[in-house]
Amino acid sequence: MSGNVCHRQDNAALLALAAVSLGLITILSVWKLKQFKYGLINETGGAMFYGMLLGLAVRCVPFDRGVHTESVCSCGALNSTPTILMVNLTSHVHCYRHVGHNQRCSTTSTPHTETFDPVVLFNLFLPPIIFHGAYTLNQKRFIENIGSVLTFAFLGTIISCMTIGACVYGFTRLMVLLGQAADGDFLLTDSLLFGAIMSATDPVSVIGLLSDLRVDLDLHTLLFGESVLNDAVAVVLTHAITTYSHMGTGHTFDRLAFLHSVGYFLGVLAGSFLLGFIFAVITALLTKFTRLHESPLLETSVFFLLSWSSFLSAEACGLSGIVAVLFCGLSQARYTFHNLSCEGRTRTKQLFEVVNFLGEIFIFSYMGYELLIFPHHVFKALFISGAFLSIFISRACNIYPLSFLLNLGRTSKIPCSFQHFMTFAGLRGAVAFSLALRDTTTEKRCTIFTTTLLLVCFTIWVLGTAADPMLRYLDIRVGVDTDENPEEDLSFEVATGRPDTTPGLWHRLDYKYIKPLLTHCGPPLTDSLPQWCGAFARQQSSSPQAQEDEEQLCETETNDSTFDLAKTDNQLISFGGESGSEHQEDLVEGDLGLGTAPALSREA
Amino acid sequence: MSGNVCHRQDNAALLALAAVSLGLITILSVWKLKQFKYGLINETGGAMFYGMLLGLAVRCVPFDRGVHTESVCSCGALNSTPTILMVNLTSHVHCYRHVGHNQRCSTTSTPHTETFDPVVLFNLFLPPIIFHGAYTLNQKRFIENIGSVLTFAFLGTIISCMTIGACVYGFTRLMVLLGQAADGDFLLTDSLLFGAIMSATDPVSVIGLLSDLRVDLDLHTLLFGESVLNDAVAVVLTHAITTYSHMGTGHTFDRLAFLHSVGYFLGVLAGSFLLGFIFAVITALLTKFTRLHESPLLETSVFFLLSWSSFLSAEACGLSGIVAVLFCGLSQARYTFHNLSCEGRTRTKQLFEVVNFLGEIFIFSYMGYELLIFPHHVFKALFISGAFLSIFISRACNIYPLSFLLNLGRTSKIPCSFQHFMTFAGLRGAVAFSLALRDTTTEKRCTIFTTTLLLVCFTIWVLGTAADPMLRYLDIRVGVDTDENPEEDLSFEVATGRPDTTPGLWHRLDYKYIKPLLTHCGPPLTDSLPQWCGAFARQQSSSPQAQEDEEQLCETETNDSTFDLAKTDNQLISFGGESGSEHQEDLVEGDLGLGTAPALSREA
């Protein structure tokens, strides 16, 4: 083994070791703090703190790398930044890939000593985190509140983006007036881009916060559902605005570019959604019609690989991987989960739990590290103040009016205390950071990056720490058991005589056709499908092992308490006997999932 | 986001997607084949095959990368191969790390189109595989056969290395005689290096083979234990020979260099062993004295990170990561495992199982891929034939004489049929490949790499496929239940009145001091330690939660059937009442773990 390779490997191992030690220290210290009831700091905040310490250490103690550097030739013919640089050394062809992260804007000459490739880091860790968020979302609560969650996620994110954009744009104009920036440094599109980046509230830190405090389940679903889904909107919005600004002229409004970016927004969102759904369908069919569940290891591996494929395929197709993996996670929980063996369910859940936990720690450590080690920070006091102000204003403009509108349609209103807390708990995290990191080639993008990083630190440390006192101040119920008693819900259904599923066209479609097609639950397809589809329906429901599997799976169903919907569905079938579709008659038309059904049971 | 970054990301995603799809196809097709009772091809062989298909596709369809390439400047001042190449583009400092894999020897001008970095691949996947192998080794059987396993692993590997080296050296002399190579192309040290590389039999494919066929448990332990431990020996031997050849003069024997390399061999082996053990001790103490087991997620994460740290620390210290992680795995199974909560045990096992399974598939796919895509293959017919011949000769020289010697000391002899099968089942795999891959800068190293790859393919496909018929031909018991009935072993102990642990100094030390110190099992330290250590012993055994934990853990113990030793130990304590150390009196002195104890029970 040559000495060079050896040295390089040692260095790589040293850095990886630093990262692993960081993770260990974070886990142990946060856990120890929690034991002593200092619940104020959670994993994400702790990880960021230790990441900063590592960054500080690397910055202060620039360890000798023992590498002999010499300038061998200079070259004036290269004007642009190439993607790949091929270097021919003594007739060996060497191909160096250009790492985007190194495309920096400043003119500092300090070599950037880091070795973590953020693209690899995010491609490796972010998808499982987002997937885990979607996969473990309490399906029943989510579907009850789906209307509200979607309103906050879609409409709310767009409102947020506009408000932050407008507010920050005002501050950039002020900067021009005060002579701190040249006219044209920050266009409206840049402000809107910043708005889109900052409008992604972070599911990772939000779930950290909510799980620790175990708040009211409706508030949990609203906040977490919103933070998971608004990532998707923010990601696509960021891309759409980038597309617009690449096409547009900057100052004037370009209708064509606007339409193009709106089309792009809708196209990418729909495409990514579809791709995520397709991968979930593939997994569901594979687990339904094969005997994969006989080997939980194979089942888990296939599940893991197919779910990750949804991310990779979307990225390879130029769509949004995060959106795809998000919808894939939602659909996997809704369909594939029912086809897994009991051990397979536990394994997939636990596997993603560990990957999510470690990924979270690494990503937040990396953010802390980057805050101190990134060599091209651009601090603009006015921009930062504007951004700080805007995130609160935007959050208020998003939550209060939308809650008011939603409360008109909800039977279980969103109380004022929930609204205050939702406004308060707009933590930003990994997605905002990764969106800002994607491009740091120009000075304004560096300003955006620095400001994003500061805001992420601020919201996680200050707002995250203040969440506990805030909950007490607002008198919101904490310490709720997340694994709520399913019997309670069932008894409600039996008492009222109607199932606890939210109706509407999609739900009817889902219950009657998609669920029976992809799982062994729901009414038989032979009942739902028209006469002329009889052969297909029979083939779908009477696969050789279908009956046997169904029995086995429905037995295992009772062992799991997290995914209540699964149980509820099955129990509905058993209550309804042969005619599962009869229940549909009872569904109330026109309810948009604004939280109607469960209100009675909870308010009683 | 700039177009370049976007394009690069798409390409990376595309490659990752190809890898993931490959994994999926492998899993599904091998599983399907197994369902139809075509048990001949296992995962590793299948993965290699699909990897080759991918390599063929990439080679035949060189997809357009849409990159504009232009030669911008030439440079004559660079004579050596630098580790890091710093390229200053329009005043941004770009730092390109030199990828060792690209240090190629040939003069072909085809650009190497691959993007997988094998160093990352092996640092990521190999440690969990080796760890999993060590961690899931049947502890009881392993300790019963430890003498034989160590003899095969240490003495056997050195014999193998020498035999292959001598045989291949003979063939290289023949090549010189036939004019196919110049005198001095292949030195004796190169042949010995090849011998060291090829003497690592592969635990991954061996376990694949043995688990599928479920052979006799003693044969399983001997083969698997040997293949796990000889990796460590082969890795360190390879490094030691490299060290010698860097110091030595080549043709003549250099005593100083020889002593240096022997010292290096012993030092690295001991250092790596110690480091692995230290990390296991840290994990054991952490899990013994803290309440980590209250959260299985934290427990699993800490366990995972600390185990991985052993690999990284060893690599960072210039020791052997594989050896460290191997001993760490063995010690974790022996000590830490007892301190984990019931869920923690299942989780760690399942987590490593999934990582191991996926890692295995990716590594073997990569080998198949590399066979077709590596641009600098050097095929030397005579060298390859010599190598083919030598691996069989060396295996025979290793197994038969050592078995004869061991049988002199064993009460349960190693039957001839076992010896034949052990000679036959010398599959080579990931470790040999990774050792050969570490350096491909010179033509002889490329020859070694190509030959290694061919031998790996041959042993996995041909020998792997022929294993099943061979077992039938040799009339070896297959279809044995790996989770043997622990009651049976216990009744034997009760009947003979002595515990089923192999004695000796190490075992006495382990049972009396290390186990009670690191776990809650074994006799209390207050009994084992001398009087003057009383305070320390009491402190170790009477930590606030020790008693309570012990009870809880010993309850959970009964739920697990794989790690029989754990159970046996605990049951011994409960049978022996207060005086756990009394059992030691019954231990037969001088037995080296050659398989004495269980022979009676099995032969009965």
Image (tube, coloured by chain):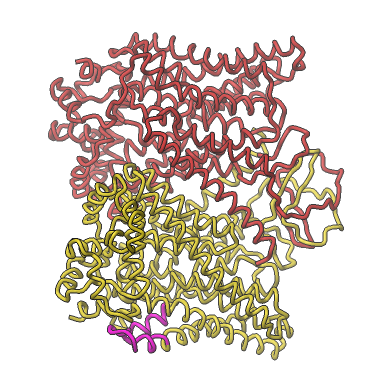
Chain colours: A yellow, B red
Q: Quadrant of residue B473?
A: top left
Q: Quadrant of residue A566?
A: bottom left
Image coordinates for residue A134, horizontal then vertical, percent: 40, 64
Magenta: predominant secondary structure element? Answer: helix
Which residue is depicted at the point 23% across and 44% down? B541
Which residue is depicted at the point 71% across and 47% down? B84
Quadrant for the C terminus of chain B in the image: top left
Image coordinates for residue A15, horizontal then vertical, percent: 56, 50
- What range of the chain is rendered magenta? A402-425
Position above or below: A221 against A275: below
**Residue A418 lies in the magenta stretch:** yes
For residue A415, side relative to residue B151 (left or right):
left
**Residue B571 lies in the magenta stretch:** no
Quadrant for the N terminus of chain B in the image: bottom right
Which residue is depicted at the point 32% across and 31% down? B138
Residue B330 visible to an observer of this rendering: no
Q: Nearer the viewer, residue B315 or A276?
A: A276
Q: Nearer the viewer, residue B412 or A152?
A: A152
Q: Nearer the viewer, residue B93 or A400?
A: A400
Position above or below: A408 against A466: below
Q: Nearer the viewer, residue B257 or B208?
A: B208
Residue B303 visible to an observer of this rendering: yes
Position above or below: B50 against B421: below
Image coordinates for residue B509, horizontal then vertical, percent: 30, 29
For residue A173, side relative to residue B150 (left or right):
right
